[in-house]
Image (tube, rainbow, N blue to C red):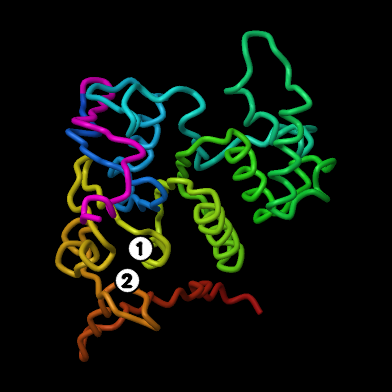
């Protein structure tokens, strides 16, 4: 067996991918190869192109360049599944009805969900520990429960590549860990390829096999978390000095310490004291 035999096959390739809005390029010359079964974390400042890249991969925005499956050919509607950053939870819709929306890509024109589609949805809910929520409306769920249901909808599509746009936005730390551990478990069990835009750099380093650092629509770095999360590079791209530490075997990225205030600096200017004007003495007692 050679070294090449041990290299995971490609799940998806993007070459010279470009997106422009109103004549301004917001994603330029993006080249990526996603390995089957890996977790690729997309990091970068706000506006760096993370969400645009995900939407371009799945074909939701006009783009130039090419996106193809590892086996060749353009991805179809069942090959990629995108979990958006702020999914709409329709009022009155039950959890199982919402998860069934993930089967839409498999339906023909004017076809409704079959019993097989319903079995897929129920099975996904059961695996995610959400079977007891099937009849509850989506607006009745807590933040963590809602995020799990949105993931369930994405998984019900049964696509080999799962794209996540800030999957833990607006969640507390406990629910963040719960959702990310769930995605990682499903990735390892089902061989999913995961691409996730992630805001927190330490969390991205904890779960992703590789990180892609985006800077103003371009790929600034691609590699292992240890290779990408260098203090100099991250400080330059984010425009603020950071420190990278290792804690219990995991990388943690924090802002550089604040510069202490100079002693002897002038304090706040006191506000003038307002006094009531004295009434003139009119000689009246």
Reply above or below: 8 against 103: below
Identify the disc placed on residue 253. 2
> Dot 1, crowdedness within 10 Å: few (<14), some or many (≥20)?
many
Residue pictured at 27% horizontal, 79% vertical: 258
Which label's residue is closer to the chain start, 1 or 2?
A: 1
Q: Quadrant of the C terminus?
A: bottom right
Residue pictured at 36% horizontal, 53% vertical: 41
Residue pictured at 21% horizontal, 21% vertical: 23
Reply above or below: 66 against 108: below
- The residues bearing labels 1 and 2 have C-alpha atoms spaced at a distance of 6 Å
- In-image side of 171 versus 38 (left or right): right
Residue occupying the far front of the picture: 1
Residue 180 x, y percent position in the rendering: 53, 59
Say which of 260 and 17 sits in front. Answer: 17
Span highlighted in magenta in the image:
1-23
Q: Secondary structure at mark 1?
A: helix
Identify the disc placed on residue 182. none
Do tag 1 and tag 2 residues touch (Cβ < 8 Å)? yes
Residue occupying the far top of the picture: 109
Residue pictured at 35% horizontal, 74% vertical: 252
Residue 210 x, y percent position in the rendering: 31, 57
Identify the disc placed on residue 201. 1
Tell how many labels.
Answer: 2
Q: Secondary structure at mark 2?
A: strand
Say which of 9 and 273 sits in front. Answer: 9
> Dot 2, crowdedness within 10 Å: few (<14), some or many (≥20)?
some
- In-image side of 76 versus 265 (left or right): right
Residue 272 in which image quadrant? bottom left
Residue 170 lies within the magenta run: no
Residue 21 lies within the magenta run: yes
């Amino acid at each position: 067996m050679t070294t090449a035999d041990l290299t995971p096959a490609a799940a998806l390739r993007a070459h010279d991918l470009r997106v422009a809005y109103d004549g301004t390029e917001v994603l330029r010359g993006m080249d990526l190869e996603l390995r089957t079964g890996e977790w690729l974390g997309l990091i970068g400042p706000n506006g760096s192109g993370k969400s645009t890249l995900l939407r371009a991969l799945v074909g939701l925005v006009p783009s130039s360049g090419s996106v193809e499956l590892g086996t060749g050919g353009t991805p179809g509607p069942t090959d990629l599944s995108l979990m958006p950053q702020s999914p709409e939870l329709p009022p009155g819709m039950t959890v199982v009805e919402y998860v069934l929306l993930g089967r839409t890509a498999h339906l023909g024109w004017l076809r409704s969900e079959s019993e097989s589609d319903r079995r897929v949805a129920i099975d996904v809910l059961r695996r995610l520990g959400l079977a007891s929520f099937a009849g509850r409306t989506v607006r009745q769920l807590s933040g963590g429960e809602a995020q799990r249901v949105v993931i369930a909808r994405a998984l019900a599509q049964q696509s080999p590549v799962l794209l996540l746009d800030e999957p833990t936005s607006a969640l507390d730390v406990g629910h963040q860990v719960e959702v990310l551990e769930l995605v990682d478990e499903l990735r390892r069990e089902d061989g999913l390829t995961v691409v996730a835009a992630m805001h927190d750099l330490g969390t991205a380093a904890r779960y992703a096999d590789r990180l892609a650092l985006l800077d103003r629509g371009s790929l600034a770095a691609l590699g292992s978390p240890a290779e990408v999360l260098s203090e100099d590079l991250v400080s330059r791209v984010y425009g603020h000095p950071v420190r990278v530490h290792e804690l219990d075997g995991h990388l943690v990225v924090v802002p550089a310490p604040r510069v202490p205030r100079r002693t002897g600096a002038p304090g706040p200017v006191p506000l003038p004291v307002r006094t009531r004007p004295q009434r003139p003495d009119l000689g009246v007692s």
